[in-house]
Amino acid sequence: MVIMVQKGLFVASFVIFSFCVAFASSASAQDAGYGHLKGRIVVTGEVPAAAEISLSTDDKQYCVDTGKPFTSRKLLVGPDGQLQDAFVMMYFGRSDKKRPEAHPSYKDAPSVSLDNVNCRFEPRAIFVRKGQALEFKNSDRIGHNCHVVTMNFEENCSLGAGQALSIEMEDASRLPGIVKCDAHPWMEALLLVREEPYAAVTDEDGSFTIKNIPAGEWKFQFWHTTRGYLRALEKDGESAVGKRGEITVTIPDGGVLDLGDMTIPAEFLLEEK
Amino acid sequence: MFGMFNSKSLVIPAGFVSIAVTALLFAGCGSEPQFHMNAVHKLTLETEFQDGTPIPEQHIQQVGNLLTAFFGTPDQPHFPAGHESLVDPERLERAAGPVPSDLSSGRGLYRKHCSHCHGISGDGVGPTAASLNPYPRDFRLGKFKFKSTKMYRPPTDEDIRRVLKRGIAGTAMPSFALLPDDQIDALVDYVKYLSIRGQVERALLEELTNLEEGEDLLPPKTDANQEDYDYALELVMELVDPILNKWTKAETKVVPLNGLPDDFGQRMYFYSDVGKKLFFGKANCVQCHGETGVGDGQTENYDDWTNEWLKRANVDPYKREQVQPFLEAGALLPRKIRPRNLRQLVFRGGSRPEDLYRRVKAGIEGSNMPAAPALSDAEVWALVAYLIELPYETFIKEQ
């Protein structure tokens, strides 16, 4: 068993030592034995404007987005290339048996909600823990359904106008799945369900922060819906990840590991599989 | 049967027997059919995870070896040890194998009654499949539409038995009610066997995309690698066991038939009116089944069996050059799924009130029909009443 583990580590390791470790000031009360991980993903090169989604007259009646253009949200990039809705999650090779203990602060985590607004899911990408309930809301004047499809868990419930319901995520998956509404085929949210609390979705600024990770060596993986594993991710012009978009990091005890700006070429994200 | 004859020829001296065997082979009825690898899923995974790079042949071989070790062959099937309560070895034996020429031994039931549509592997692409609409079910996803259990939970034995006995109205699936009960039971277990085998195959193929460089799903066993081998097998069992466990627990996931109003029969018009309001309102049936209930509301979707490759491999169904490789791998031409036309009084999952109750309450797995947890039992029964009355109603212009 030991032999296998070492073999796996040896091959998959892209150990990043060069990232600066900024130790947190005494003001941010950090627990001994834990540290934070943060960073930002930036797209380099030109990303064309998102394609418009054509709506039928019926759909327009209920799905008007206050005059804003109704465009695809598959690839959302900020004015300076900030990549939104990328997932950063712990990566476990097949033989990595070590799993992190969840920090006590995750014990009473607030529930995660997913709203249907103007026939779009809000927010567009979410992370939920196994066993946690996902609270669905429908703020629209029209009915939707909440069709959850992940690798290991599926559910499909009807959600009438103005209603709410909660679905417990019974099984975790190693990659994000989707929530879709079958009545409105363009509606799709990304959903990651994991046992451990250590994952994040990049925000409008392309940034992510994962708090209170047990100090020590862990692998993290970067994923985006356009291409899956972000294996073209670079740091200072050098490839930063393995073929599954994974890096090995050492979380500092009581500190913050800042990965800084990592870049991904636009042509990688836009290339058809 | 190759395997069987080969092993026999080891003990029986060559001569008369081997001549007989050779003659049989050339006659075309002696060659044993084999399970086909799920090539569509393989291609999907290669597209989804590896930008089209093929999975190495040696890894595919390892999946094949594991499947044979767990499940045997179409002529000599067996089931993972310790799970005989799920699939009975004797029933499996009876359902499997070639159809005997004298019809007396009672073997070969699946090949006699089922495989021409559902295929030897249960992949739903038997010789007749492409010309049927809807296509025959591919059992390998482990998904079944018409059952008493919750969505995305396996069906009970009784659910499969009912489909075999009654057939599926509005499809090519006939009734096998004339078969003796013990033959039906054997086929029920064989459907479960093919389904579970298919699910395990999918899980193992999926795991191949997760292997580290130089790692094997299950390395060839040698004297030196006992520890590695055992560990790899342990990882494989972590994929297999949850599939078996879900099937074992199927009975506990039955959707109860609650809250049938005492006056349901006497006050049908009342309940039907309530149901009609729900149809257009809270339950939102109108969205897909359309304002007149003919199933023309949302007709742009595909079912799970098609989305399985269409969506995961990001295939545009209108681009033939993208679809073609999947057809060559064994997929059938994608067809959109139609919401049921509720005016025909033909309900595939059965037209008893309890069947309709379960379709509304628990939804229909694999289709786009959602469950309705937000509706009370009384509301679901009201919808059932409306479904019974709807075909006799003149076309509705407005709600």
Image (spheres, coloured by chain):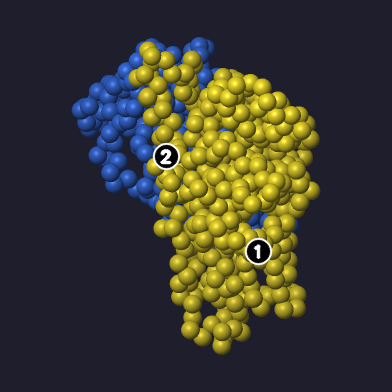
Chain colours: A blue, B yellow
- Identify the residue at horizontal 60%, vertical 65% (top origin): B284
What is the quadrant of the C terminus of chain B in the image?
Answer: bottom right
Residue B141's disc number: none
Relative side of A172 to B365, left or right: left
Which residue, as the protein is rendered here, is positioned at the far bottom?
Answer: B266
Is residue A90 in view? no
Which chain does the numbered disc 1 sit on? B
Which residue in the protein does label 2 denote? B81
On screen, residue B185 above or below B190: below
On screen, residue A219 above or below B89: above
- For badge 2, the amino acid type reads Ala
Element type where label 1 sits in the image: loop
- Identify the residue at horizontal 60%, vertical 38% (top origin): B75
Q: Position of residue A7 (x, y in %)?
A: 39, 14
Q: Position of residue B260 (x, y in %)?
A: 49, 77
Badge 1 density bin: few <14, some 14–19, many ≥20, Cα 10 Å = few
Mark count: 2
- For badge 1, the amino acid type reads Leu
Which residue in the protein does label 1 denote? B178
Relative side of B278 to A248, left or right: right
Nearer the observer, B238 or B151: B238
What is the quadrant of the N terminus of chain B in the image?
Answer: top right
Q: Position of residue A260 (x, y in %)?
A: 42, 21
On screen, residue A196 above or below B344: above
Badge 2 density bin: few <14, some 14–19, many ≥20, Cα 10 Å = few
